[in-house]
Structure formats: C-alpha cells, structure tokens
C-alpha cells in the first residue's frame, strides 16, 4: 500500500467516471497505454484486480476490491485537493502572522505595516503580542520588533531612533538644550529595562546625575507627567511622534547628542519564514526607511 500514488488514484477515478480506459485517457490528456500502466501499478500496490474488462465498447466494471478502493480514493483525492488549496492560499499570503511589538512601534510603524499587508493579502490573519521584556520569547511570534540587538537570532536593523528632550512648554528656550542643564533636574523616565539602562548610563558617563521623580512604562503617562510640570523626559523620536504638535510640551534636540536607540526586526534563527512573514519584513524595512527620512521639520526643536 505504500506504493499507491495520487496520480494513479486520479486515473482510477477517471476510469470509473468515464467507463473506459480510452475515454479516461482523453479526459486526462494521457495515452491509453499510460492509463493502463497507471491502473496496473495501482493493482500491484493494492494486491488485486480493480476492474473487470468485458472488452469491446462495454463499460468496465469495478470488482468488489475496486468498490472498496473507490470510496477511499475519493476521500484521499479530496484531501489532496484541499491540501493543494490551502498551500496555494498560504503561498499567496493567506496565513496567520503573529507579530511581537512594543508601544513606540505599535503607535507609528505598525499601523502602516498592517494596513499595507491587508491591502496585499485581504484574508491574512494578523495577531499582535505587545510585551516588552529583556529576554523575549521568539517561539511565540513570527516576527518581533525590538529595541536591543539579540544574539543568536536572525535580525535586520530597521532604524536609529534618536533621543530628544521633552519639557513643559516654556521650560527651556527654543533650540537645542545642553545636557549639563539637566544635571540634577527633575526627570520623568521609563522603567530601567530594555534600552533605558543604556540611556541612563550615557547620561552618567556625561556627568549628568539622575534625578528621576517618576517612572512609567506608558509613553502617554510619561508625557502627561511632563505636561503637568513634574519634570522633563528624554525619549526617542518614535515615542514622541504623537506629541509634536502638543502646545503643552516643547521638544528639543540634545547637545551633545546621545547615541540613538536602535530598532530591530528579529525572528528565530534557521527557520524558513512564511511568504506573509517575509513580505511583512520587506514592508517593515521600507516603512522604517520612510519614517527615518521624514523631514526633520516635523520634529521642531522647541515649540514656541
């Protein structure tokens, strides 16, 4: 039974439907001898005759063994056809894609990415997992946006995300702000995980003493605390994307600059991506390039 081939079952089914080897050959585009060879090979694999051949113009008849095989052949061919359909849909991007993300990307790059994916693949199933961790679990996602390089995985760097100072409106004059002016100044910050420790170390290396009066994981919470006058914050560009026109805040370049946060797209090493995941990675790189090359005037250094 291990030698049964789907093409032989297809030929068998055609002979049953057409009633003769000749008409089955015409339907399948085979020669009659090829049909005979397929049926002979199937009979050898099954271990018995499948057709009684009366000869002449009369229809061939199924043997009792042929009757048994007919039902199972139909089921196998139907399953094979269903599998072919699923595979073709998968290749066309109609699969599931789970994306790991974090809030800065979720609010900027991700909506554009999902919109473009759904334009190209209307029936794709996109699921999101937003969980910031120093040790991400890549086994649960197809792609992961992350703000640190990760060893032992496949990754592409999407963009450098430069840091800016966000202050209550009027707190500093328009223009760049020297880091020295932030020494012992009240500051609002993210919790000390992911890229935040590198930022705080850069400040310490520059002789800036930390005076963090409040920490919050949410960008909007940090910005609200700054707007309320509790302190200033140093945040990367993606995190303040929606606050550029906020009249209660002023956004300033830093002098000297701090090394930018790096945004990566990562996935498990040595795993073949689905067509949908591969296309998502291509689009993410393109969208990140567009964001990186946005006109710098959109981030005005110090709102009047």
Image: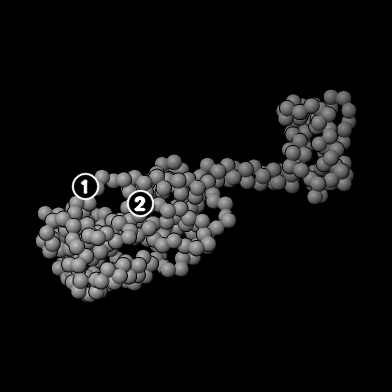
Image color mode: one colour
Taking the spot 69% from the left edge, 43% from the top edge, the residue there is 77
Q: Position of residue 180 (x, y in %)?
A: 20, 67
Q: Secondary structure at mark 2?
A: helix
Q: Nearer the viewer, mark 1 or mark 2?
A: 1
Number of the label disc, if any, that sits on residue 109 = 2
Number of the label disc, if any, that sits on residue 30 = none
Q: Position of residue 266 (x, y in %)?
A: 47, 57
Q: Position of residue 298 (x, y in %)?
A: 22, 48
Q: Position of residue 236 (x, y in %)?
A: 29, 59
Depicted 219 relative to depicted 54: above or below: below
Total labels drawn: 2
Name the N-terminal-most of marks 1 and 2: 2
C-alpha gap between disc 1 and disc 2: 19 Å
Question: Does residue 183 appear in the picture of this structure?
Answer: yes
What is the quadrant of residue 176 in the picture?
A: bottom left
Report the residue marked by disc 1: 297
Question: Is 271 on the left or on the right of 137, as rendered?
Answer: right
Residue nearer the viewer, 99 or 239: 239
Callout 1 crowding tier (Cα within 10 Å): few <14, some 14–19, many ≥20: few
Q: Quadrant of the C terminus?
A: bottom left
Taking the spot 83% from the left edge, 29% from the top edge, the residue there is 33
Question: Is 90 on the left or on the right of 3, as rendered?
Answer: left
């Amino acid at each position: 039974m291990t030698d049964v081939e789907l093409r032989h079952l297809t030929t068998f089914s055609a002979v049953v439907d057409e009633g003769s080897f000749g008409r089955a050959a015409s339907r399948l585009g085979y020669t009659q001898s090829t049909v005979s060879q397929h049926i002979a090979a199937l009979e050898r694999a099954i271990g018995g005759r499948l057709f009684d051949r009366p000869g002449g113009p009369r229809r061939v008849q199924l043997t009792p063994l042929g009757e048994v095989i007919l039902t199972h052949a139909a089921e196998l061919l139907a399953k094979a056809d269903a599998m072919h359909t699923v595979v073709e849909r998968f290749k066309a991007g109609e699969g599931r894609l789970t994306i790991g993300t974090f809030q800065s990307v979720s609010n900027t790059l991700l909506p554009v990415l999902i919109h473009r994916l759904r334009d190209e693949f209307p029936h794709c199933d996109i699921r999101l997992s937003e969980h910031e961790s120093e040790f991400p679990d890549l086994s649960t996602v197809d792609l992961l946006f992350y703000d640190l390089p990760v060893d032992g995985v496949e990754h592409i760097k999407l963009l450098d995300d430069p840091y800016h100072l966000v202050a209550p409106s009027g707190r500093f004059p328009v223009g760049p702000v020297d880091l020295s002016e932030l020494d012992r100044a009240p500051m609002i910050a993210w919790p000390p995980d992911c890229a935040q420790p590198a930022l705080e170390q850069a400040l310490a290396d520059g002789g800036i003493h930390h005076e963090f009066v409040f920490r919050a994981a949410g960008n909007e919470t940090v910005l609200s605390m700054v707007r309320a006058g509790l302190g200033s914050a140093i945040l990367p560009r993606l995190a303040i994307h929606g606050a550029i026109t906020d009249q209660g805040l002023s956004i300033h370049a830093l002098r000297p600059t701090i090394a930018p946060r790096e945004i990566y797209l990562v996935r498990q090493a040595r795993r073949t991506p689905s067509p949908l995941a591969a296309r998502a990675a291509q689009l993410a790189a393109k969208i990140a390039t567009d964001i990186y090359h946005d006109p710098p005037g959109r981030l005005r250094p110090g709102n009047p």
